[in-house]
Amino acid sequence: MSWYYTPLPTVVPAEDFDASADANALRKAMKGFGTDEQAIIDILCARSNEQRQEIAEAFKRELGRDLIDDLKSELGGKFEDVILGLMLRPEAYLCKQLHKAMDGIGTDEKSLIEIICPQTNDQIKAIVDCYEEMYDRPLAEHLCSETSGSFRRLLTMIIVGARDPQGTVDPDLAVEQAKQLYDAGEGKLGTDEEVFYKILAHASFDQLEIVFEEYKSLSGRTIEQALKAELSGELYDALSAIVECVQMAPHFFAKRLHKAMDGVGTDDATLIRIIISRSEIDLQNIKDEFEQMYNKTLVSAVRSETSGDYKRALCALIGGA
């Protein structure tokens, strides 16, 4: 399957790891007058999430202090956002980002799409369980109150784990699903949105790959062309995200990173979220894709858009030029 690439992280567990030594070094970096930000970056940006949790435990056990509280009192701005984000467990971090996207006035649909659409059932289940634990409210319920129409139905289907497990493939069904998509869009006047979101929310990524190939054989057009012609708004954005993640997830994230840094101003929230959440999954693949697509390295793009400790932390997570 072409979507099945070998995920390469940029952050891996440190060898010869010593949680106590790291905890003491962090305390030293924050003790007294002034803070040694570089020491904090050198430690926390070069450890896996699991190791960071161990450091926090050692900090509590041996120094009787809360590492998160100490970091909060010593750091500020976007640098603080990065470091505190790194200290959360991966699913808790994404839950916090989802909550932020729905909290207050207005909803950040693009963030919801970016966080929810690429996930497998197992990942979604971890997020759903964690969300209810953190906010004492089911994620599906919160989503339903913040979104509407076909977009809401699509996200709800993904959230309730409607997608078939990875590896589920039925070539005969793929032919049928491709025809259903054609009949719901190009093959008729108007569009039956329900057919689109049901198939794209239910079928495994492996299955969707075959469906898209069958669609091209049947209609002579790519699924992307069909979506563009038939749909619009958030539903189009969400279904396009699924299509991109089926074909090559790093491409989807590279595009999002580029958009976050393109033009006037920088979308720091997106920049931080993708770099943190993908650093232990496939950030190396995203880096390679970014360079291929935009003819510049991700590190050089980040360097030109950020500054200070914030820049150093992100570059440490991305690794290498």
Image (cartoon, rainbow, N blue to C red):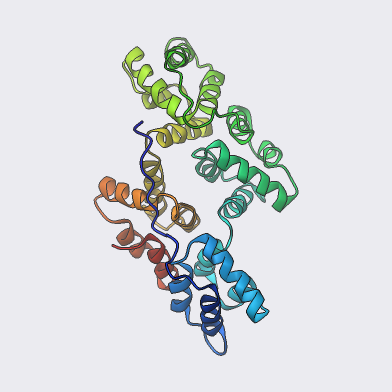
Closer to the camera in the image, 249 or 281: 281
Q: Position of residue 247 (x, y in %)?
A: 37, 33
Which picture quadrant has residue 302?
Answer: bottom left
270 or 118, nearer to the observer:
118
**Residue 252 in view (yes/no):** yes
Q: Position of residue 63 (x, y in %)?
A: 64, 81
The residue lying at 60 percent from left, 48 percent from top is: 98
What residue is shown at x 58% (from left), y 64% (from top)? 53
Residue 71, position in %: x, y? 58, 74
Q: Residue furthest right?
A: 136
Name above or below for residue 15 compared with residue 251. Answer: below
Res 161 → quadrant:
top right
> Observer-nearest residue: 46 or 61?
61
Q: Quadrant of the N terminus?
A: top left
View extreme (left): residue: 295
Residue at left 44%, top 70%? 16
Residue 171's place in the image compared with 236, above or below, is above
